[in-house]
Amino acid sequence: MQRYEGKRRALRWLLGLLAGLGMAAELSAQTPGRAAQGVPQHWISYGEMVSNQFAQWLSDAQQEGVMELHTWLQDRVLKEGKPPLPPLVARVWISPQGMVERVELPSLGEARVDTRLRLLLSSSPLPEPPPADMRQPLVLQLSLDFPLPAGQ
Amino acid sequence: MAWGAITGLRWLVLLAAPAALAAADAVVPPVQASGVFINMRGDVLTARHAVTDCRTVYVVKNTRVVVASVLALSNAADLAVLQTSLKPLLAATLSEQGAPAGHSIAVFSEAYALLQALPERGRVLANALTVPGHPGELQMVSGSRPGASGSAVLDEGGLLLGLVAERVAAGSGGGVAAMQPGAPRAGMATQVRAVPVEEIRQFLQQVDVPYTQSRRAQIGTLQSPASRASTLAVGILCG
């Protein structure tokens, strides 16, 4: 239990924010600012909402699998000495009812973790259905990182 | 969209074509008033009367309840800003233009607790009409019920037009009552006064609370203001 509480405290700094928003047909993940030009405001607003919801789901220690993902991310850097993951580009399809129907992500290198991440992003309904005219997939830049301890 | 075809309150709840989200199953604590996220740092705009004389103010969002501190109270309008540790998914965007004074428009406003339980929220496009002829004010005819104090008034583009303050006439008329639990319930449409967006903007500027404003719709045609209101809304508990 004590160990679990320790991990919960660690969660506060484990996950960075999701950032970057775009609509697939018009966007390149490397240039989110330029890509947002010409995108309707209500698409942008909806995309921000989805992005923030994903960030909350991935930071919620009560969600099954979040601890596992965080531990994997931490161990990857601190124990295995690998560099932090670069930002990932996620392509997300949302149903008219607001369910995340499909998530495409580059592999993190471990099938179990890939599956866990997809499940975390698609298990619950989004708070709002998407705009009917919004192009899909929604493209989000996903940053899974954490600050290294001092001296590292 | 044929708003002009609306001839009575019975038809005020308009349903959009396809999209539908089931109402949340979560149990909502017995909140007494409502509020709306006004910026992404988690500040909440609400009605001043909902938080005065409270020893402790709690803010409720979904399953989270946090203690809030009063950041600012307006002397001129029924407005208050609360500081919370909540992280909003979105914050309200103030309408640059406000509600038109010369004609009525369809809007959406609902108490937090009722909004969370609203069936097929994703299909509701409006539940109130503004009442023209009140320069400098925002009045509307709605089915607003107790607990609506501090709830956002959103236009069809999801922009904030005002904040519900009080009921000024219920049914056949008469009386002014704060819209909190315990206040008499109207059996039919109620005339409600909201603090207009111009006063909200002035207040937020005076107390240096960040906000965003726009003329551009934040939701699309046939996208539900009720769903957006739910994303933006919080409940207020006076302890």
Image (cartoon, grey):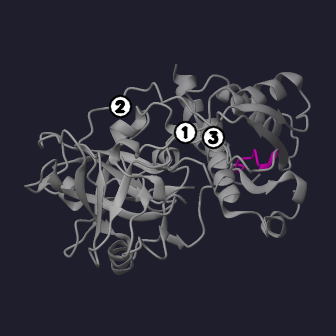
C-alpha distance separating marks 3 and 2: 22 Å
Q: In the rendering, which numbered label is found on residue B28?
A: 2
Amino acid type, mark 1: Gly
Q: In the rendering, which numbered label is found on residue A129?
A: 3
| Helix, strand or loop for disc 2 | loop
Give the image location of residue B224, x and y in percent. 54, 47
- Chain ID, mark 3: A
Give the image location of residue B182, x and y in percent. 12, 39
Point 38% across, 52% down: residue = B7
C-alpha distance separating marks 3 and 1: 7 Å
Q: Nearer the viewer, residue A52 or B112?
A: B112
Q: Is residue B60 magenta?
A: no
Q: Nearer the viewer, residue A84 or B111?
A: B111
Eyeballing the image, is A12 above or below A151?
Answer: above
Amino acid type, mark 3: Pro
Q: Nearer the viewer, mark 3 or mark 2?
A: 3
Please indicate whether residue B126 sits to the left or right of residue A146 in the image: left
Q: Which residues are magenta?
A: A137-148
Eyeballing the image, is A11 above or below B5?
Answer: above
Amino acid type, mark 2: Val
The quarter of the image holding the C terminus of chain B is top left
| Helix, strand or loop for disc 3 | loop
- Chain ID, mark 1: B
Task: Tell whether label 1 touches label 3 (CB within 8 Å).
Answer: yes
Give the image location of residue A29, x and y in percent. 87, 56
Q: Earlier in the sequence, mark 1 or mark 2?
A: 2
- Chain ID, mark 2: B
Question: Disc 1 marks which residue?
Answer: B122
Eyeballing the image, is A102 above or below A48?
Answer: above
C-alpha distance separating marks 1 and 2: 19 Å
